[in-house]
Amino acid sequence: MYMKAKILFLLISVSLSTVRAVDSQFTALELGISYIAQDRIVLISEFMGASVTWSCSPPLIATSGANIGAVSRPEVGSGDASVSLTATITPPSGNAFTKTFDAIVAEKDYANMLTYVTGVSFRTAAASLAVRADGEANYTVLNNGKPVVYPNRLLSEGTDIMRTPSLFRHPDKSFGLIAGNNDSSEFAYFYDTKDLRSYTNERLVRLNAQGLNVHNAFAAYDNAIAAYRVYWQTDASPQWYETITDLEQIIEVNANVIPPVRVSTGSLPQGAQQANAIRLTKAEHDIIRLRMTRLHNTGITPFEDIYVKEGSPVTLPPQAILEYNDGTAKHMNVDWNKDDVARISRPGRYTVNGVINQQTYIEPFIRYRADPMVFKDPDSDYYYFTGSYPTWAGSNNDSYTGVGYDRIILRRSTTVQGLGGTVKIEGEPAGGSTPAGPYNPNNIEEITIWRQATAGNAFNRYIWAPEIQKINGVWYILFTSSNATNSVWSIRPAFLVNRGDPFNPADWNEIYRLEPLPDDPHNFEIFSLDMTYFKANGKDYVTWTHKPGNNSTLVLAEVEPNAPWKLKSNVILLHQPSFAWEWENTPRQEHRGGHRINEAQAVIKKDGIIYMAYSGSTVDHNYSIGMITAKETDALLNPDSWTIQRFPSLSTADLNNQSGPGHNSFTIDANGNPIIVYHARIPGEHDGTGNGGLDDPGRHAFVKPVQYNIFGDIILYMTPEEELNPKFKNVSITIVVN
């Protein structure tokens, strides 16, 4: 056996029997595995000159004979089983002693889990996932078919291109992922995952010292040596190599080996290539399939009968409880039929019908309003809307040069729906109608509360991404403006203050630039934008985008609650563009070139978790919304408190007839449920310049419900039909009058 004197293993528990005059070296024997999900393990018969025999209780693992180490796994659906394996160790001299190892034997396999890529570009050569239960003809793609694991583009030895991604098991019930480094180096990507959704501890591990390019790599753990056997090929060679490694460094490399038989992938999903499969138990399959397929409404919790005395008023439940396929629920208001209620009089049984009042929104919600912000005033019934006022550079009218991104607009309504609709943009060609119909059919009131032209040279175009907040009873507009004339790269955050009526432009009469601490190197001397405010665990924070060099990064600082333009902490870096979906990708850009963009943060909280959405990539079809999270009670100014999701939560692939979703805000609807307001383009539309850039005004506001699954993942792409199945929209309740 290999390097037995140096074996190190992970154990669930070890009990050591009485040891009499035994050299301590013999107590180093370990089983080397605590979760057994294969059909055979290695039970050694000799250890450092001592003989070893085994027993197992219950007898699920053969401990003698030709089949020693064979595992009898429980049947599918019966659950995993606990076993105790006892080794009797008899040294050459001295007394025998025993050592017992507790382990879990997994039930029999139930499904394939597929890992694959969909192309060779850095956006498509990332690991996607699919599952197929035994007996099913086709795989079900996970995560809407989007990759789940993108390589970190900042790794020095990385090529950003994954090849042949393959899952393998660790000895403790968790998994690892290995992927080739574009088949062009001696390195391979490795990751760890406990839940098959979140992949951590990314590293590039060298698999040979000769500089041979690694192809088709896959890995398997060997409990006999407490190490991993990685099998791979190299350029234009049919032979297989084996690297024995602890996943950090090479232990041994062997050539001309025979690799183990791999799991058959079967028929692949459309577009899948370079695929590998691993076997999962039913529990593993059911969890990942539930977690990474689309959430949908499965029913309504039945209303209990209501019993009232004759002549007494009837109080109907104001909301219905909607049930979802993962066991979660949400509440929605019910509009009860007043005529049915009016018929209740004498003793008897009555049925009252109702309609669930699902909140729906026109699409697009507001045309030509990028960076949409909706805020619900906690002290009144009003919702407020603001967003960037665009240019219409395609007007070919010199009179409108410099128009757009030059003002802050505001809308107000007692409903979210009342904020919707489109009004004409200054400088837009004549015509009087949008592609969706006439302008302003609902007489929307949109006012201008501030213009750059009245602010002097300190606050110039470009006025971007205003958002309205109410902090300790005072109204603020957080926005971006340039500190130089017509210089888009000189923009900095600012605060506009209103201590009166937010819908009265005259009350917006204070304005401030951000004030950092004196010793803070992040001192707003370079390109900064997209500031938002949030409160957590009694402290006030702002987060925004800071652009040193070619990286547009996410930063965070604590602020004074009564003067939130004044920072009371140094600025910390939360995240910088690290994944392919956050980077520009156009034919003119060289490898790793182009813009690297994180921007446009927005915060929502649920059950003590802070979900910080942000946008990545350029403002075209690649624009997407990512997510970082932290516990509200953690030290938020410690970057290690934040968890970065490797893939976007909302992208073009998640939507129908929308492209490049991003720069969102969160609020609540009339039912008290969270919603996301974001902008996106409509494929095929070409307004203004029509080039998809900042002078193309065709970024429109849209609204969707926000949902959280049973695992705490935030869902941003739910359709109205998934939120409420139309067949459950009509409800009824029985009233019994005594």
Image (cartoon, grey):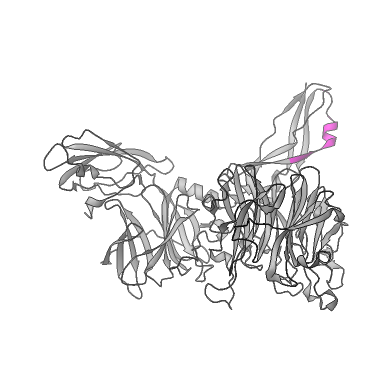
State the image coordinates of residue 524 (x, y, percent, origin top left): 65, 62
User: For residue 338: magenta?
Assistant: yes
How many numbered markers are drawn? Answer: 0
Image height of 208 relative to 721, above or below = below
Whether residue 397 is visible: no
State the image coordinates of residue 41 (x, y, percent, origin top left): 29, 49
Residue span colored magenta: 333-346
Image height of 167 relative to 683, above or below = above
Name the quarter where the N terminus is drawn.
bottom left
State the image coordinates of residue 707 (x, y, percent, origin top left): 64, 48
Whether residue 611 is visible: yes
Using the rendered view, name the quadrant where residue 488 is placed.
bottom right
Using the rendered view, name the quadrant where residue 336 is placed.
top right
Using the rendered view, name the quadrant where residue 427 is placed.
bottom right
Residue 638 shown left or right of residue 603 in the figure: left
Name the quarter where the C terminus is drawn.
top right
State the image coordinates of residue 298 (x, y, percent, origin top left): 63, 44
User: For residue 401: magenta?
Assistant: no
Residue 68 shown left or right of residue 188 in the figure: left
Specify the farthest residue to the front.
Answer: 518
Q: Which residue is drawn at 31% across and 41% down?
A: 60
Residue 464 shown left or right of residue 278 in the figure: right
Decide which of 229, 248 is in the foreground and name it.
248
Decide which of 287, 498 is in the foreground and name it.
498
Image height of 572 relative to 325, above or below = below
Q: Which residue is drawn at 74% across and 44% down?
A: 472
